[in-house]
Amino acid sequence: MRVLGIETSCDETAVGIVDGRGVRANVVSSQVVHSRYGGVVPELAARNHVRGIVPLTKMALEIAGLELSAIDLFCATYGPGLIGALLVGLSYAKSLAIALGRPFLGVNHLEGHVYALRLARPAPRYPFLVLIVSGGHTEIVLVTREFHYRTLGRTLDDACGEAFDKVAKMLGFPYPGGPHVERAASEGDPRKVRLPVPRPSGLNFSYSGLKTAVLYHLREQPRSDARHVAAAFQEAALDHLVAVAQRAVDATGVKCLGVVGGVSANRRLREKFEQLGRERKLRVSIPGFNYCTDNGAVIALAGRRRLLAGATSSIDLDAVAREPLDAVSFGSSVAMS
Ligand code: KG4
Ligand code: ZN
């Protein structure tokens, strides 16, 4: 079965094609227009998706060496994300499905991120914990079986990637700032700046205090070296992720841990989680860089598995701004709508 997956939930226009053997094509166009505004402008994102979606689909088909008529299933992210942006990919996938008489399946964006783990080596075994760390989400989810999700904790304020982006802005780096903070941090000494590691209750996360601490530090010492500030921020931000993941491992006794989402592209994050794996004898899975950030291949992978499990989506499936993974768990009343 050949599956085409479309992702337009935020500022990446992305199309991926997968079949039973793996990924045949995965093209992503990151919209640079937002960097001028220091963050994603929803209407501009939607307009750019409109411009990009058709040529990107053609490019993906060309790379895969396939005609559109060879696609057996069309998938698109329907949420969570920016409504206007989501509607572009969602409507386009539906139109292709109708025109070609093929099934259509809407995919939850977070489930797409989780399915990137199928491309990680090693891939996790059920049950596993997955830490989703992106620009819009920071949460830890227990996956007991395929399509069975329980969110154990989430951010109480900012997402981890959002904090990277905000700190990057304070340091004068363009949006999206995560990779810039990482680059600066690699040349800095985290011990030169003292920042607090967040400690919210339970298995939750919190990044607004750390972000504010960076702001106050820069106000008090405006001439401090951006590389040291970036390094200290990155250490505290990542140590917080590791600490919560470790507590979730202790609380559940699960032996497999996956880390997905844009921030998992961070090399220092990968080092820290690999170290945690060695210390705690955990099987740690982190997808390759191309599958950490938003892309269409993981949407196609998730959609393919859902179709094989008997799901399809109604052609009037709407876009949603928010939707926890628990809502798409099998057995949940909203699942497989
Ligand atoms: O998953 P993603 O592509 O989109 C969302 O669903 O949000 O994640 C984007 C986020 C941005 O906040 C970006 O700054 C962050 O991931 N990011 C990074 C790195 N690469 C991307 N954060 C830290 N280090 C990186 N290398
Ligand atoms: Zn994402």
Image (cartoon, rainbow, N blue to C red):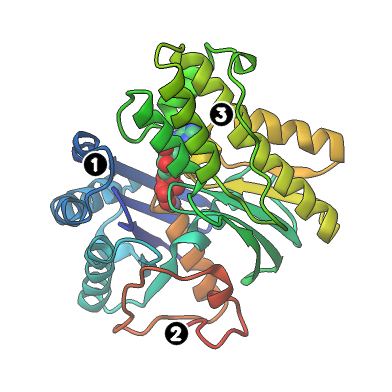
Q: Nearer the viewer, residue 202 or 63?
A: 202
Up the image or down, 6 lies above or below 233; here it is below
Question: Where residue 246 sits in the image (x, y, percent)?
Answer: 77, 46
Category of crowding for the residue at label 1, using alpha-carbon neighbours closer than 10 angstroms: few (below 14), some (14–19), many (at least 20): some
Disc 2 target residue: 337
Report the disc number at residue 31.
Answer: 1
Distance, label 2 to label 3, CA atoms, is 40 Å
Depth check, mark 3 against mark 1: the one in front is: 3
Q: Earlier in the sequence, mark 3 or mark 1?
A: 1
Q: Tag 2: residue type?
A: Ser
Whether pointer 3 and pointer 1 mark residues with C-beta atoms closer than 8 Å, the reply is: no
Query: Where is ligand 1, by quadrant?
Result: top left
Q: Is mark 2 within 8 Å of ligand 2?
A: no
In the image, 223: left or right of 58? Answer: right
Q: Is 123 left, or right, of 135 in this rendering?
A: right
Residue 234 is tagged as: 3
The answer to whether mark 3 is within 8 Å of ligand 1 is yes
Count the numbered circles shown: 3
Residue 24 seen in the figure: no
**What kind of element bears circle 3?**
helix
Q: Residue furthest front?
A: 220
Task: Estimate the spatial distance between the alpha carbons at disc 2 and disc 1, rounded to whole Å.
Answer: 31 Å
Q: Residue drawn 86% across and 57% down?
A: 253
